[in-house]
Amino acid sequence: MNRIETLGKVVELAEQRRDSALAALARLEREMQQARDQMEQLESYASEARQRWTARQGSTVDPAVLGHHRQFMQKIEHAIDFQRSVLASRQSQIDQQQAQVQSAERDLAGLRRYTDRQRQHLASQALRREQKQTDEMALGIYLRQRQIEAARTGGLPT
């Protein structure tokens, strides 16, 4: 396996690393959206419960019902607080994964640039070799023609 083929394999591995990082980021973003949807549901439910309770304020309320309502609202607020921590955690994971994606993309771009430079270098070397061979062949033809001319004229080549 030559150097360019080896570099091609390295680039391929870097592409796989980048693709895996992108897939993980997409998964985390879907999870984040699910967490946001759940937060929205909790907040909506809490708002509806508050509105229902506000509508009942003019009427007499059994103290036990009031106690149950307060416990219920505390549980909803606790669930909302927990969901906030889930959202913060998901955002942190997304931030970390975005950094990994950027790192993988930087590495891949660098490897591609290096591979391109190596290809250009090898092409340049091949062109120089070809030019050298062409020059040597032309010189050989020129010298043979001079020898033939010298032999025909019986003299020394000029």
Image (cartoon, grey):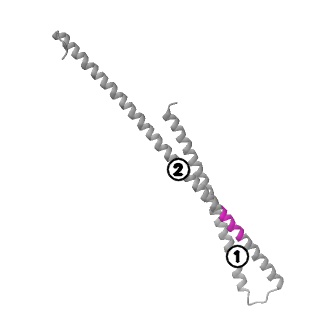
Residue 62 in the magenta stretch? The answer is no
- In the image, is 84 to the left or to the right of 74? left
Tell me the crowding category of disc 1: few under 14, some 14 to 19, or many 20 or more residues within 10 angstroms, Cα based. some
Residue tagged by mark 2? 105
Q: Relative to 79, does residue 25 appear above or below in the rendering?
A: above
Element at badge 1?
helix
Q: CA distance from mark 2 to mark 1?
A: 43 Å
Residue 93: x and y, percent? 64, 58
- Image point (72%, 74%), residue name: 77
Element at badge 2?
helix
Q: Relative to 36, does residue 127 appear above or below in the rendering?
A: above
Residue 84 in the magenta stretch? The answer is yes
Residue tagged by mark 1? 46
Q: Amino acid at mark 1?
A: Ala
Q: Toward which corner of the image does residue 70 lie, by quadrant?
A: bottom right
Q: Amino acid at mark 2?
A: Glu
| Residue range (magenta) | 80-89
What numbered label is drawn on residue 103?
A: none
